[in-house]
Image (spheres, rainbow, N blue to C red):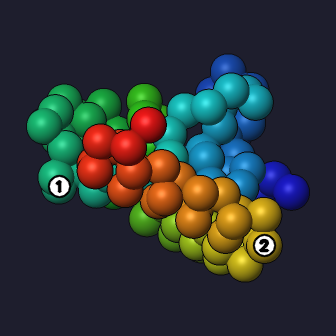
Amino acid sequence: MATLVKTTQDGRKVEVIGQAVTLGGKLEAVELIPVADHPNRAGILNVMPDAVYMAGRIALTEAEGQVALDALAKGEAEFLANPKAIEERFRYAARAREAELGIE
């Protein structure tokens, strides 16, 4: 299920689908970065003074960022509760451990 965060000036939808922020249906980011921590914060704030978060190339206001953060948290909770996802995480951990020990 997709959660609409905003629509860009050119009409593309910024949505959260599962654990990803998408722009026009294509992956844009998997996390939000606070503008205060962004290396180009001066440039971002020059273009969009009310930006608080960045999702890839997309600047988000506080309200938009909160919608995205809530949707990302919900997507992560659903993923973590999925039995197949749990099984896959254990399988990945076992493979990583085997590689660490040199077992092939």
Q: Residues within 10 Å of mark 1 (few under 14, many from 20)?
A: some
Taking the image as shown, residue 65 lies to the left or right of residue 41, namely right
Q: Is residue 43 above or below residue 33?
A: above
**Relative depth, front residue between 17 and 93:** 93
**Disc 2 designates what residue?**
83
Q: Residues within 10 Å of mark 2 (few under 14, many from 20)?
A: few
Q: Is residue 13 above or below residue 53?
A: above
Q: Residue at x 26, y 35 (%)?
A: 44
Q: Residue at x 42, y 30 (%)?
A: 57
Q: Quadrant of the N terminus?
A: bottom right
> Which type of secondary structure does the marked residue at label 2 adopt?
helix
Taking the image as shown, residue 41 lies to the left or right of residue 56, namely left
Q: State the image coordinates of residue 66 (x, y, percent, origin top left).
A: 52, 69
Q: Amino acid at mark 1?
A: Ala
**Disc 1 designates what residue?**
36
> Marks 2 and 1, how far apart in space?
37 Å
> Which type of secondary structure does the marked residue at label 1 adopt?
helix
First in residue order: circle 2 vs circle 1: 1
Q: Residue at x 66, y 58 (%)?
A: 88
Q: State the image coordinates of residue 54 (x, y, percent, origin top left).
A: 38, 45
